[in-house]
Image (cartoon, rainbow, N blue to C red):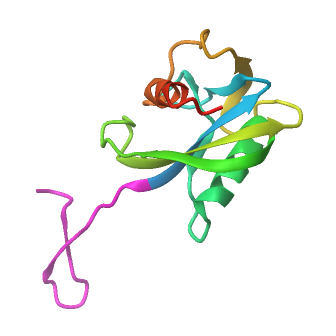
Amino acid sequence: MAGETLNCPKCGAVVKTFRNPFPTVDIIILVENRIVLIERKNPPLGWALPGGFVDYGESLEAAAMREAKEETGLDLVGLRQFRAYSDPRRDPRQHNISVVFIAEGRGTLQGGDDAARAGLFDLDALPAPLCFDHEEIIRDAISSDFK
């Protein structure tokens, strides 16, 4: 298949290339029993949990803290891992594996970075559409009594 092999620049031999999923984090941020969601600036458009890609050399926890601050302006308290989501179809752009965290948010909520805006929502009144598999993630968290 095209794009799956390269030629060695020294000897010209065919070399197989490898593709790996990208590590990401998503954060369920609670503020007074409401959930923080961001409205995405970039496709896919819609509402989503705050989160993003893990930078090289960065821990998952550090990525969650950074992404939360960049996209919502909030600091996280009581950060804990919830679950990992790995369905190759969860993101229409590429295969991403997300480690989901739960934390309380502190500070002044404001959208930033990739977020056009950020909002607080009751768990039984979420906006639509929700991007990626974030509806499933939120449903899983509610059924596990994550609070």
**The quadrant where residue 55 appears:** bottom right
Image point 69% across, 35% down: which residue?
Answer: 29
What range is drawn magenta here? 1-22
Residue 89: percent from left, percent from top: 31, 37
Residue 84: percent from left, percent from top: 44, 47
Q: Main secondary structure of the magenta part?
A: loop
Instruction: Using the image, determine if residue 45 lies above or below residue 87.
Output: above
In this rendered view, identify the residue nearer to me: 54 or 138.
Answer: 138
Left/right placement of residue 62 relative to residue 52 reads right
Instruction: Using the image, determine if residue 7 lies above or below residue 51.
Output: below
Q: Reply yes or no: does residue 8 show up in magenta.
A: yes
Q: Quadrant of the C terminus?
A: top right
Image point 36% across, 44% down: which residue?
Answer: 94
Q: Reply yes or no: does residue 3 show up in magenta.
A: yes
Residue 40: percent from left, percent from top: 60, 28
Image point 49% across, 25% down: which residue?
Answer: 143
Left/right placement of residue 104 relative to residue 129 reads right
Residue 130: percent from left, percent from top: 51, 21
Image point 76% across, 35% down: which residue?
Answer: 72
Q: Residue furthest front?
A: 145
